[in-house]
């Protein structure tokens, strides 16, 4: 006779945990495609709290080996670059396609390898032999040649910034044949060849931007450099110099020239170089302070470019103490405007904010002294939580580590102030079930559309017990989620859909606290694309993370 105790409780239907996560807690393994998508949206090949760069590379290669669907790899390369805004992951996937499927490699090359920095990274990865190729075959050469022969002079100049490898190394291996004298002269100049070797091209064939850059570097006066940046001349027809500030830095002659450069910077470059402008005296001029502040908080520009609060929070965290208050206030205002780009959810949610010790790791990994980003996992998680709360003010934020914290926050407070305040909670161990347990106890009479859990998913405790499976073999999150669902269905009159759980994982680990199913979504990443996936899912859109990748058109 069957043991009836096996079937005596609904809890016995919950899936049993299958693995131990990096922290040693019980967890569920993600499938190969999902785990790879998670990695492609979060991995940076730098040390994290639980993994070093070498183990991340090994994990990535292992996941790629398990995914035999080359079309999915191609779509994931594009998703990683265009929607998750990653730099190294799309390159690694493109390098894999170079060895697996050259047709797909060429299909995604121009979208995944969209600037000189990632072109040089691809070249470096191929030379390493880690992804199946050790040199540029004729097919790979054609892709590199196409990029070099079609990139604008400005794009090539930007590509020339940086070493190991240098752009000259790429030219030497790709061996592009210039289609005209203008590009022949440009290639010769970029690779420091003697002018005699440019023949039949001459210095007169150099594109305007390179000739203007040469003129800027050799100019003897401030006035001459400013005129080159403004495009001013006797007849008024000379184009202005448009070059990255790092190409001008060594020869720029003081604050006036740097101010002229700031006026020509795009919104992103301006936001990212506030400390540089401060260092070079630009903000000693009150008029320039106002100009930069106005451009940072330009509502039309923010809405047109669909920038999210994340970028402004990063700029705010990285701004030095010397950057004027008016500039920092402009970042606050810009983040508020950008909150309009965060979707409104179909109802209030419980927002679980992981503030445990492992969330203190830099979001892009620890790269050593002086190179690590100030933007930590907790900062990104707090921003996500604050942004959701600002657009959905009836939601409830619960910061947690191995205990819940009573977050005294005002949804009408500025988004950056909210984020900064929330990031100061916690610092202990990790129990990801706590937000749901709090909801089941303190908020039991309230209706919610679901729960959004923002974490690195490295839970290792439950109900004050460490490294132990729940009595039914599931994780603590699943035990509390089951109770949450039962209560919400009761409150909402037996709604057959019920609430939904969203687990946002912001680190490249391959496990989760709640397995993928109709009422549970696992999504990885810390880009703004995550907001739209979450809103679609809570609004009954069936688009899941892997499906989101599959929806990419090649």
Image (spheres, helix red, strand yellow):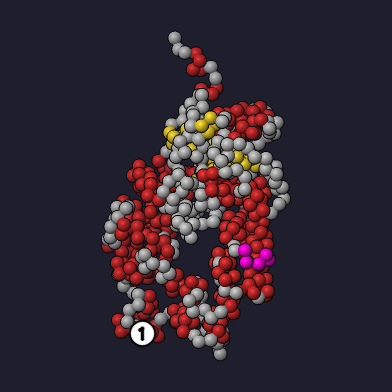
**357 shown above or below 119:** above
Apparent side of residue 27 relative to residue 95 in the rendered image (left or right): right
Quick one: 222 or 360, which is closer to the camera? 360
Would you identify the image quadrant in which residue 214 lies? bottom left
- The residue closer to the viewer here, 511 or 94, is 511
Range of residues picked out in magenta: 321-326
Q: Residue 250 location, x and y as percent?
A: 48, 76
Secondary-structure class at tag 1: loop
Residue 373, relative to residue 222: is it above or below?
A: above
Q: Position of residue 186 (x, y in %)?
A: 38, 77
Q: Is residue 415 left or right of residue 530?
A: right
Judge whether residue 341 can be spotted in this image: yes
x then y, percent, for residue 267: 58, 66
Q: Position of residue 410 (x, y in %)?
A: 72, 47
Q: Which residue is mark 1?
A: 202
Residue drawn 44% across the image and 34% down it: 20
Q: Image quadrant of residue 326?
A: bottom right
């Amino acid at each position: 006779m069957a043991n009836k105790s096996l079937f005596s409780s609904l809890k016995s239907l919950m899936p049993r945990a299958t693995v131990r996560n990096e922290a040693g807690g019980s967890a569920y393994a993600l499938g190969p495609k999902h785990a790879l998508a998670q990695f492609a949206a979060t991995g940076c090949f730098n040390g994290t709290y639980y993994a070093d760069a070498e183990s991340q590379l090994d994990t990535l290669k292992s996941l790629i080996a398990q995914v035999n669907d080359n079309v999915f790899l191609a779509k994931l390369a594009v998703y990683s670059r265009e929607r998750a805004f990653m730099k190294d992951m799309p390159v690694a996937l493109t390098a894999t396609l170079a060895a697996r499927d050259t047709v797909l490699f060429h299909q995604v090359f121009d979208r995944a390898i969209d600037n000189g920095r990632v072109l040089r990274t691809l070249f470096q990865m191929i030379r390493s032999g880690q992804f199946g190729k050790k040199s540029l075959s004729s097919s790979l050469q054609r892709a590199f040649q196409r990029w070099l022969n079609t990139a604008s002079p400005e794009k090539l100049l930007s590509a020339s910034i940086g070493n190991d490898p240098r752009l000259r190394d790429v030219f030497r291996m790709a061996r592009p044949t210039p289609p005209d004298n203008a590009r022949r002269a440009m290639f010769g100049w970029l690779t420091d060849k003697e002018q005699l070797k440019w023949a039949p091209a001459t210095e007169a064939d150099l594109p305007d931007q390179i000739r203007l850059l040469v003129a800027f570097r050799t100019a003897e006066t401030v006035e001459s450099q400013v005129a080159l940046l403004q495009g001013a001349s006797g007849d008024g027809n000379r184009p202005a110099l448009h070059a990255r500030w790092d190409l001008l830095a060594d020869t720029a002659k003081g604050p006036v020239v740097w101010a002229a450069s700031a006026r020509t910077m795009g919104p992103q470059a301006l936001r990212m170089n506030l400390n540089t402008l401060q260092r070079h005296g630009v903000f000693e001029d009150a008029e320039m302070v106002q100009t930069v502040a106005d451009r940072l908080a330009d509502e039309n520009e923010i809405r047109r470019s669909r920038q999210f609060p994340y970028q402004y929070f990063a700029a705010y965290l990285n701004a030095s103490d010397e950057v004027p208050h008016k500039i920092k206030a402009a970042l606050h205002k810009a983040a508020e405007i950008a909150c309009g780009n965060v979707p409104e959810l179909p109802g209030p949610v419980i927002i679980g904010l992981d503030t445990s010790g492992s969330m203190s790791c830099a979001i892009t990994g620890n790269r050593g002294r002086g190179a690590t980003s100030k933007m930590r996992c907790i900062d990104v998680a707090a921003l996500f939580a604050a942004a959701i709360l600002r657009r959905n003010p009836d939601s409830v934020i619960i910061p947690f580590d191995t205990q819940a914290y009573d977050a005294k926050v005002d949804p009408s407070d500025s988004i950056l102030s909210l984020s900064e305040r929330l990031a100061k909670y916690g610092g202990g161990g990790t129990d990801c079930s706590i937000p749901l347990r709090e909801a089941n106890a303190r908020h039991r009479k309230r209706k919610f559309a679901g729960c959004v859990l923002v974490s690195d998913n490295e839970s290792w405790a439950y109900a004050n017990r460490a490294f132990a499976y729940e009595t039914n073999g599931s994780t603590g999150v699943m035990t509390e989620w089951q109770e949450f669902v039962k209560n919400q269905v009761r409150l909402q009159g037996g709604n057959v859909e019920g609430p939904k759980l969203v687990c946002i994982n912001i680190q490249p680990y391959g496990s989760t606290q709640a397995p993928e199913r109709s009422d549970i979504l696992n999504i990885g990443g810390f880009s703004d694309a995550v907001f739209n996936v979450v809103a679609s899912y809570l609004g009954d859109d069936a688009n899941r993370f892997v499906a989101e990748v599959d929806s990419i058109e090649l």
